[in-house]
Image (spheres, grey):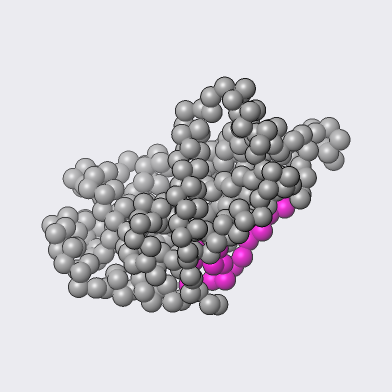
Amino acid sequence: MVCDCKQNRKVLVISIFFACLVLIGLIFFRFGAGTQSAVSEEEKTLVLSHVLFRHGNRTPEPHELYPKDPYINETYYPYGYGQLTKAGKQKEFNIGRALRDRYKHFLGDYFLPQIVEALSTDYYRTKMSLELVLASLFLPNKEQMFETGLYWQPVPYDYLPSNHDPVLRGFMCPTYRKLYNNVSNSKELEGELRNHEVILDFVSKNTGLSVTRYADIYDLYFGLLIEEDWGLALPSWTKEVWPEPMNTLAVQEYYVMTKTREMRQMAVGYFLEKVRSMFNFVLPSSPRSFQLFHQIESCLAGFLTLCSSCSSL
């Protein structure tokens, strides 16, 4: 797979614009969308919408646990590792409801395959999340129901294998991985991490891990966060570092992932190009188009990090 990506100033404009869309979407889901009359006025001229979102609450991945973890033998039955929980499923279903409420005039009363394009990354939790969003976004009308009492209809979506998905998984590009490893093992980053040596040594001692990179803190952070979300009491040692400074240190991994211009281009360049290419063909008379992109948190955070650094692209 060729992963080199060239970007022009148009892409930068789209990145800034799309960052605004993401922030507006977050505000909407948190605080509500305002009056319905205002929404209707906006939808009169709306022809294209892109929605980018993350999966819901999940169980931990094995690499997010640690040798001294008191819950290392927890099976997370009946979900298993790295899967959506009941709370996560409800959250994704509610996103579909919110989108339906916001875009009901734009989408219409019936699911029409020519209007919707839905794309997921190749993880069970992201594919399930997208299915849940689509399920509540397109509840069947009476004419579309094929089983009495079943308020669901199949809605197609697409995905590519993780190692062949430049649009949503640019981070998996072999060339990108080489650049990431160079940055992760650089003298500059080693010097930066020495400023946190006391914290890293403390975490290493209490977890049984060798915590030497932001990536190590990143994985551990999600493991602890998910255990807490599952209702498990965190060990007493975590009071010294949880949620801070672990949260701040974990966030630094996103900046490592998007450290250089070339890394940022390969990580999200193909996605931005897909968005930009669709804007090129939008006219007031264009058919309606609703684009859904489902990603894991590292991809979404990488995109937002790029937007905050777009002046250096």
For the record, the magenta segment spans 155-173
- Look at the image and tell me whether residue 123 can be seen: no
- Look at the image and tell me whether residue 247 can be seen: yes
Residue 34 sits above or below residue 48 on the image: above
Query: Residue at 61% of width from left, 44% of height from top?
Result: 49
Closest to the observer: 283 or 261? 283
Asked if residue 277 is among those painted magenta in the image, a careful observer would answer no
Residue 137 sits above or below residue 304 on the image: above
Q: Quadrant of the C terminus?
A: bottom left
Query: Residue at 46% of width from left, 60% of height from top?
Result: 9
Asked if residue 168 is among those painted magenta in the image, a careful observer would answer yes
Residue 231 sits above or below residue 209 on the image: above
Is residue 166 found left or right of 234 in the rendered image?
right
Report x, y in % for residue 239.
21, 42
Report x, y in % for residue 229.
41, 41
Query: Residue at 50% of width from left, 48% of height from top?
Result: 18
Q: Quadrant of the N terminus?
A: bottom right
Report x, y in % for residue 267.
45, 64
Closest to the observer: 120 or 84? 120
Q: Quadrant of residue 258?
A: bottom left
Is residue 86 found left or right of 249 in the rendered image?
right
Query: Residue at 66% of width from left, 36% of height from top?
Result: 45
